[in-house]
Image: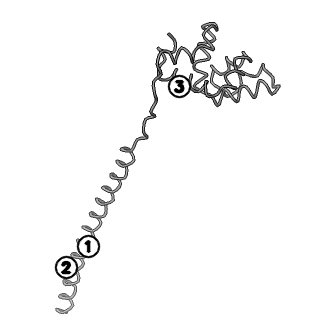
Amino acid sequence: MNNTMTDVSKSASGNRGSRFGATVFRIGLFVGCCCMAGTHVRAQIAVAPPAPVVALRSAPDLETMVGPIALYPDPLIAQILPAATLPAQIVMANRYVTGGFDLNQIDVQPWDQSVKAVARYPDVLRMMDSSLDWTTALGQAFLYQPQDVMN
């Protein structure tokens, strides 16, 4: 019986040692996972997309660019400029208007309000659609140099 007690105490102390080792292993694994997760999150946050490089236009360039719409009424120009920042919607609106769709349904289309307003002027819409390079340049100038464009 004495031998049995010795065997039990040896196995109990051996279990304590292995339980301690397992606990240390689990803590180390937990800490390691937390550190790895934190590193992964920081890597995602630290990487930002590069800002677009935009060349600012000179005053004479802007005058030439704004020339085709310069004599339009100010309220119409106030719609053309933001609409020019959305050339894809200009194309869709022109397809809608020239496609024979119901012009009374323009307001329920998924376009920006400025594009809907310009769609009410088919000649202006057609000009913007047929000169997409100009429309895009005008929109970019309006985005990055709004005061210069409106002066």
To which residue does mark 1 refer? 19
Picture layout, residue 149 above or below residue 22: above
Q: Report the mark closest to the observer, 1 or 2.
A: 1
Mark with earlier residue (3, 1): 1
Mark with earlier residue (1, 2): 2
Q: Residue at x 52, y 17 (%)?
A: 62
Callout count: 3
Question: Cβ–Cβ below 8 Å for labels 3 and 1?
Answer: no
Q: Rate crowding at label 1 as few (under 14), some (14 to 19) or many (20 or more) other CA atoms within 10 Å.
A: few
Q: Label 3 to label 2, Cα distance in Å?
A: 76 Å
Q: Rate crowding at label 2 as few (under 14), some (14 to 19) or many (20 or more) other CA atoms within 10 Å.
A: few
Q: Label 1 to label 2, Cα distance in Å?
A: 10 Å
Residue 148 appears left or right of 110: left
Using the rendered view, name the quadrant where residue 114 is placed.
top right
For badge 3, the amino acid type reads Gln
Secondary structure at badge 2 equals helix
For badge 1, the amino acid type reads Arg
In this view, the residue in front, 21 or 130, is: 130
Question: Cβ–Cβ below 8 Å for labels 1 and 2?
Answer: no
Q: Residue at x 34, y 47 (%)?
A: 42
The colour scheme applied to this rendered structure is one colour
The disc label shown at residue 13, or none: 2
The disc label shown at residue 140, or none: 3
In this view, the residue in front, 9 or 17, is: 17
Secondary structure at badge 1 equals helix
